[in-house]
Amino acid sequence: MSRSTHCAAWTASVVLSGFVAVGLTGTRPADADQPASQTAVGRPFFAFCFDTHDTRQRNLEQQADLLKELGFAGAGHVGLDGLPERLASLDRVQLQLFLTGTSIDLTKPLEPQLEPYFRALPLLQGRDTLLYVVLTGYPSRDPRGSEPGVAALRALAERAMTHNLRVGIYPHTGDWVSRVDHAVEVAQAVERTNCGVIFNLCHFLRNEELDSLSTVLRAAGPYLQAVMINGADPAGKSDPDWQRLIQPLDAGTFDVPGLLRQLDALCYKGPIGLMCWGIAADSHEHLGRSIARWREWHSDAP
């Protein structure tokens, strides 16, 4: 079966009969360092939060040069401040901005919090940048967040649609949407085709059960806008810090290639981001390790 035929068949199965189980343990098997798949290599690979703990404290121009040198397709940007400068630095080296956004506190007036997004839209038009949204202010799944959460996302998605841009709900530990299944439920309630969800491995490992990964990914599949990966040790789930849940790709016991194969089976064609938050080291060193491992996984690609 060709990839296009397989994707069409999978899509039909979602609509007509639900998802068919695909095994994925989430732990690294003996052959985990084998290539993830040839098709996965075509997905853009970008770096996110690589500057927050960089011991060299590189400026935006230096960050862009670093990503270009190592071979990343581009970057994500935390927040909406400094967006013109980030775009200029990436444009200079012909890299893409894949992700930018911020948080919205659902206990506060929404309009002033949406304004930074609205101001960013003209800057991002034509760039295929995903706007991420962290929904905060209430405990996880608190019913009080439903009305303002859907309203905020719907308003943003409608405005973003006029600029051909997409919105991704970002499940984030400790906030109103902290789990992927909840993000899917909210995206369904928003009912806008350009509003979907982001899967972030480290937050999944913190907040959800490892053996639910296949089920979670299949349910999220039709809504996936971006996927964030990193090396990880699931045993660090309850650690007070993130050191075991966020590592370079050549570290940890989690089966990242298995996750990539799962995404390929779900016909996910979007960008893959490398989560680097909290890695306190020279970014050149750990980014170089991660992209080297990424290339090893895809070394069979033509």
Image (spheres, helix red, strand yellow):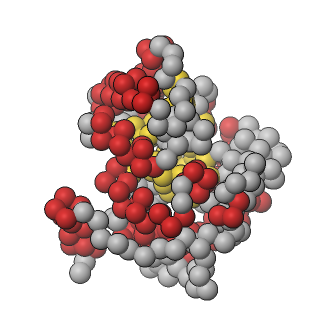
Q: Is residue 243 above or below residue 57?
A: below
Q: Quadrant of residue 79?
A: top right
Q: Is residue 22 above or below residue 218?
A: below
Image point 52% across, 37% down: which residue?
140
Q: 255 or 79, which is in the foreground?
A: 255
For the N terminus, the quadrant is bottom left
Image point 47% across, 63% down: which residue?
212
For the C terminus, the quadrant is bottom left
Q: Residue furthest front?
A: 143
Is 283 on the left-hand or right-hand side of 71?
right
Residue 157 horizontal/vertical position (percent): 34, 31
Is 13 on the left-hand or right-hand side of 75?
left
Residue 171 horizontal/vertical position (percent): 51, 43
Q: 43 or 34, which is in the foreground?
A: 34
Image point 57% across, 51% down: which residue?
207
Is 229 on the left-hand or right-hand side of 253?
left
Q: Quadrant of residue 287?
A: bottom right
Counting every numbered tag in the picture gives 0
Residue 225 horizontal/vertical position (percent): 40, 48
Residue 260 visible in the snapshot: yes
Residue 296 visible in the snapshot: no
Image point 35% across, 57% down: which residue?
219
Q: Is residue 145 above or below residue 24?
A: above
Residue 67 horizontal/vertical position (percent): 64, 52
